[in-house]
Image: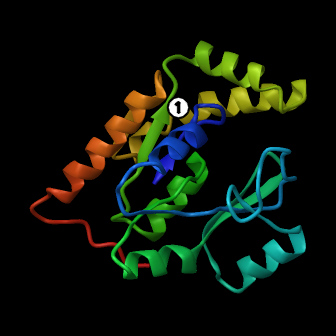
Amino acid sequence: MLSGPSGVGKDAVLARMKKSARSIHFTVTTTTRPQRQDESDGVDYHFVTQEKFKEMVKAGELLEWAKVYGNFYGVPKRQVKEALEQGHDVLVKADVQGAATIRSVVPQALLTFLAPPSMEELEERLRKRSTESTIDLNRRIATAHEEMKQLWIFDYVVVNDRVKLAVAQLDAIITAEKCRVRPREIEI
């Protein structure tokens, strides 16, 4: 699982990782937030209405879900379970709140925190992104400060100063985990 504050570069790192030769299943998160111009439904996210999302929650179809910045986000349980059954490593992108939920539901899950080189750098990345209003930007920055305090729930931390290096470190983590004497047994 990959988590970290908004603007830290999770999508850039995942995009680079998708080009690797590893057999990794990258989950597609379901969300109620509006689709951005450069996003594709079913590729970047599954975009659904709030009504549909609530139906999924009620039916127990989500491994974890949360309301973040006024929108719902969730990880489809079936997608993760099927990929694990096929022998694939599964990479879930979730916010820090979602990571905590996954840790409680799947204690053996491997959680990695993607951190910014500094909070100043993170704030600059969020400002340059220009996707939020000033109020939303300030809320994301405040939330990021709180999320940095949650490092203790994670197994690893990777600083995303350069995407290529962050991907290499994530790849090294995956390799190390595959070399464990007692491998993690994940059950969904």
- Name the residue carrying label 1: 148
- The percent position of residue 33, horizontal first and vertical second, equals 83, 54
Position of the N terminus by quadrant = bottom left
Image height of 80 relative to 15, above or below = below
- Quarter of the view holding residue 66: bottom right
- Quadrant housing residue 78: bottom right
Could you tell me residue 37's position as x and y percent?
85, 45
- Taking the spot 46% from the left edge, 48% from the top edge, the residue there is 19
- Which quadrant would the C terminus be assigned to in this image? bottom left
Whether residue 152 sits left or right of residue 119 in the image: it is left
Q: Is residue 185 rendered to the left or right of residue 44? A: left
Q: Is mark 1 on a helix, strand or loop?
A: helix
Q: Which of 168 and 153 is in front in this view?
A: 168
- Locate residue 188 relative to residue 175 in the image: left or right: right
Instruction: Give whichever of 153, 39 is nearer the camera.
Output: 39
The residue drawn where x is 42% and y is 69% is 106
Please name whichever residue, 45 or 121, is drawn nearer the observer in this view of the structure.
Answer: 45
Q: Position of residue 68 (x, y in %)?
A: 74, 50
Q: Which amino acid does label 1 sit on?
A: Met
Q: Residue at x 58, y 34 (%)?
A: 9
Residue in view at x 84 percent, y 76 percent? 52
Residue 43 placement (x, y as % from top left)? 68, 60
